[in-house]
């Protein structure tokens, strides 16, 4: 009877046959009701068309989920051009060039709005919000300043010479475009305010402060001056609107600095929180904080999904939000209450002077975590005896154990690490079977704190590097690719102009250093490109106070001597979870290292970024795997691999499923990069 009720309710709900917004539909389900391509004919799937943007460059990572409206596909390219393609042929219809030589930040898609007589495409480039005519690609002269709004002006006081960008597209509610932002993760950092703009004029409609000000809810969970001095607690992952209820669900990340919070004692609302806001006004309706006083960079890394599932024989409207931690939180949309029992998990205290961690964290008892959460000697790789011994020796020099091992001066292993668990691709949900699908990374990271490098007025470039750059790129300049690229061999890869532009403007997680001034930036640039360690004069103002006693010295993936993850496989997984029961339907490794597969190690799984889509044809499509560049189709009920192909480059993006003139297509961005071969293509598949 329950299954029959579920089937009837499924038949009466919206049939998700289009792909007019990132995530596919208004609920962000990553689901298509199209079934022309199905489990019976999937072996006949072929390339229908390929669009090569022609503007790729080294590390031209593409994360864009295409949107399709009235036969046109809207996408971005590696240099953040907006392109409209004929969705049936891949032929370019128009292109808008924002004038970027290199993308200042990733882009995960575009936002479409129409009132029936006019239609607009919204893109963000750096701190600019752009409005384009969807039919022509021309800027909208009535929006902001000739089609552009400087998003820094929405802050109070307005931001100047500050890193701010938007990597995930905004969402539409009536005539409002609601946006988060990507900001620096070390201090000084921009506050993570949520903002809504009028889609016609570009005027600011409302702001929600994620770091509360005096008199606002949550102010007492921070030190009294934090709203002036702290930063981040931002929505970089995207959000979703419940149009029926008029609410917007906004997941946030950690507060700055990521791994040491001596200046922000308390729970730090609304960092690491799923916010439910009134979409028309920005007023808080409810919130759920998953991580109190985050010192592990365990963000909510993707938009939630609006689902319906069974509880006690009744269908319940819920919101499903995964975290980097590996937990999946399933909450009632009206109240924020968990649909599964929650419990408090004790957290060991920090060993670092000044840090006060929360004594416990709330965790769901169901579903079980979709990644492992403990790194012990039993977890160490057995890929080869030499790799095992080397990792074990190194591990014994670090703090390690279960989730919530705090960063330390000794060095700590975070597992899962800052790359997840879940990542920006997020989950997919099948409204027919109530299965929730999530791909995840299972790689440990090493974080080590050290006394903050104090710098005076006249310092060597190497001292300035250690203070401002090493927290992300490491004292050795080797970074932790792909999130934080190596800087030790920039000569020949980047020009003086490109390095100078990055230092002046920042991009993505990198703050800008424009406030240093041209002479200091030129000296730092010479150090990065040519290792010339000259003295530089630093200005006295912002960012040069003694600040925090400790900062991040080491921040990298924990690898064995051959460059593979230090833990035993799987290194990447794909899971299907029944959200009626909280039980797993299946779980498999996702991805391969081609060179290991050739030696017989085929089911290791690998790092993966970009989400899945599920269809009524019984299929789950996913690219995401970083090293093998494959695009796969699985049986959605069993996890059996039904079809795969090798793409031109890795697809670090979520596919789109759509129909034109009665023909079904599946399209995905292939950009590679992130330390792998790079390109800038979109590939669409269809039946012959």
Image (tube, grey):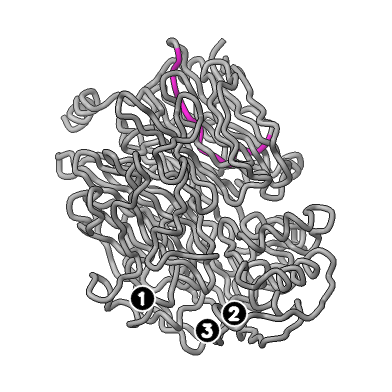
- Seen from the viewer's position, the closer of residues 571 and 232 is 232
Image position of 180 with respect to 291: above or below: above
Measured Cα–Cα span from mark 3 to mark 1: 26 Å
Q: Give the percent coordinates (x, y) of residue 674.
A: 67, 49
Instruction: Report if residue 163 lies within the magenta region.
Output: no
Q: Indicate whether residue 658 is drawn in magenta.
A: yes
The secondary structure type at the circle numbered 3 is loop
The disc, 2 or 1, on the residue closer to the chain's N-terminal end is 1
Q: How far is mark 2 from mark 1, CA to CA?
A: 23 Å
User: Measured from the top left, where is residue 628 in percent x and y?
Assistant: 67, 39
For label 2, the residue is 449
Query: Is 191 placed left or right of 8 in the picture?
Result: right
Q: Residue at x 71, y 62 (%)?
A: 560
Q: Nearer the viewer, mark 3 or mark 1?
A: 3
The disc at residue 548 is 3
Residue at 54 percent of width and 68 percent of height: 414
- Circle 3 crowding by C-alpha within 10 Å: few under 14, some 14–19, many from 20: some
Q: Which residue is at the front of the view, 14 or 590?
A: 14
Using residue 52 as the reference point, say whether residue 655 is left or right of it. left
In the picture, which quadrant includes the C terminus?
top right
Pair 2/3: label in front: 3
Of helix, strand and loop, which one carries label 2? Answer: strand
What stretch of residues is rendered in magenta?
649-660
Q: Mark 2 or mark 1: which is in front?
A: 2
Q: Up-down: is 157 above or below 348?
A: above
Residue at position x 70%, y 32% from top? Answer: 54
Q: What residue sits 83% from the left and 58% below the top?
A: 491
Is residue 585 shown left or right of residue 421? left
The reply to whether discs 3 and 1 touch (Cβ–Cβ < 8 Å) is: no
Q: Is residue 651 left or right of residue 597?
A: left
Residue corresponding to mark 1: 346
Crowding at mark 2 (Cα within 10 Å: few <14, some 14-19, many 20+): many
């Amino acid at each position: 009877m329950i299954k029959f009720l579920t089937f009837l309710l499924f038949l009466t709900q919206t049939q998700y046959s289009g792909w007019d917004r990132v995530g596919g539909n208004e609920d962000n389900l990553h689901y298509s009701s199209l079934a022309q391509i199905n489990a019976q004919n999937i072996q006949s799937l072929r390339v229908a068309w390929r669009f090569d943007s022609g503007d790729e460059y080294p590390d031209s990572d593409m994360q864009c989920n295409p949107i399709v409206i009235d036969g046109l596909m809207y996408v971005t390219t590696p240099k953040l051009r907006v392109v409209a393609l004929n969705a049936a042929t891949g032929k370019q219809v128009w292109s808008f060039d924002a004038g970027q030589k290199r993308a200042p930040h990733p882009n995960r898609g575009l936002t479409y709005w129409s009132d029936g007589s006019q239609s607009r495409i919204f893109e963000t480039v750096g701190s600019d919000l752009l409005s384009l005519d969807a039919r022509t690609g021309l800027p909208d002269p009535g929006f902001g300043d000739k089609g552009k709004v400087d998003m820094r002006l929405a802050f109070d006081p307005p931001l100047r010479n500050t890193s701010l960008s938007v990597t995930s597209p905004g969402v539409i509610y009536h005539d409002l475009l609601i946006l988060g932002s990507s900001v620096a993760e070390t201090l000084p950092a921009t506050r993570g305010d949520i903002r809504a703009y009028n889609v016609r004029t570009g005027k600011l409609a409302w702001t929600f402060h994620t770091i509360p000000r005096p008199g606002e809810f949550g102010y007492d969970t921070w030190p009294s001056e934090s709203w002036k001095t702290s930063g981040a607690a931002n929505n970089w992952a995207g959000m979703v609107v419940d149009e029926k209820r008029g609410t917007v669900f906004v997941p946030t990340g950690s507060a700055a600095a990521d791994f040491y919070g001596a200046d922000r004692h308390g729970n730090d609302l609304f960092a690491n929180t799923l916010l439910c806001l009134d979409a028309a006004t920005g007023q808080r309706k409810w919130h759920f904080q998953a991580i109190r006083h985050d010192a592990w960079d365990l963000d909510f890394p993707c938009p939630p999904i609006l689902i319906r599932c069974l509880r006690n024989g009744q269908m319940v409207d819920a919101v499903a939000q995964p975290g980097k931690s590996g937990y999946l939180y399933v909450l009632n949309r009206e109240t924020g209450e968990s649909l599964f029992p929650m419990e408090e998990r004790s957290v060991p205290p920090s060993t670092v002077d000044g840090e006060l961690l929360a004594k416990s964290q709330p965790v769901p008892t169901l579903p079980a975590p979709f990644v492992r959460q403990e790194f012990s000697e039993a977890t160490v790789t057995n890929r080869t005896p030499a790799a095992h011994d080397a990792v074990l020796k190194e591990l014994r020099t670090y703090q390690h154990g279960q989730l919530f091992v705090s960063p330390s001066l000794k060095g700590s292993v975070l597992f899962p690490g800052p790359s997840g668990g879940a990542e920006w691709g997020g989950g997919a949900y099948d409204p027919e079977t109530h299965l929730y699908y999530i791909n995840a990374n299972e790689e440990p990271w090493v974080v080590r704190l050290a006394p903050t490098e104090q710098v005076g007025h006249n310092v060597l470039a190497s001292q300035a590097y250690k203070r401002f750059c090493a927290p992300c790129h490491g004292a050795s300049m080797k970074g932790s690719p792909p999130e934080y690229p190596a800087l030790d061999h920039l000569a020949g890869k980047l020009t003086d102009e490109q390095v100078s532009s990055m230092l002046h403007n920042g991009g993505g997680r990198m703050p800008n250093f424009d406030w240093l001034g041209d002479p200091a930036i030129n000296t730092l640039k010479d150090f990065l490109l040519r290792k010339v360690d000259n003295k530089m004069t630093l200005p006295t103002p912002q960012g040069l106070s003694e600040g925090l006693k400790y900062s991040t010295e080491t921040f990298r993936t924990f690898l064995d001597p051959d460059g593979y993850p230090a833990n035993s496989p799987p290194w990447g997984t794909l899971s299907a979870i029944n959200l009626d029961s909280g039980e797993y339907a299946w779980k498999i490794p996702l991805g391969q290292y081609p060179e290991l597969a050739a030696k017989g190690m085929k089911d290791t799984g690998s790092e993966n970024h970009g989400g899945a889509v599920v269809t009524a044809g019984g299929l789950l499509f996913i690219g995401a795997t970083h090293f093998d560049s494959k695009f796969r189709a699985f049986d959605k009920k069993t996890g059996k691999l039904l079809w795969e192909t090798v793409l031109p480059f890795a697809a670090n993006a979520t596919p789109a499923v759509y129909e034109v003139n009665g023909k079904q297509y599946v399209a995905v961005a292939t950009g590679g990069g992130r330390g792998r071969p790079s390109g800038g293509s979109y590939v669409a598949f269809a039946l012959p």
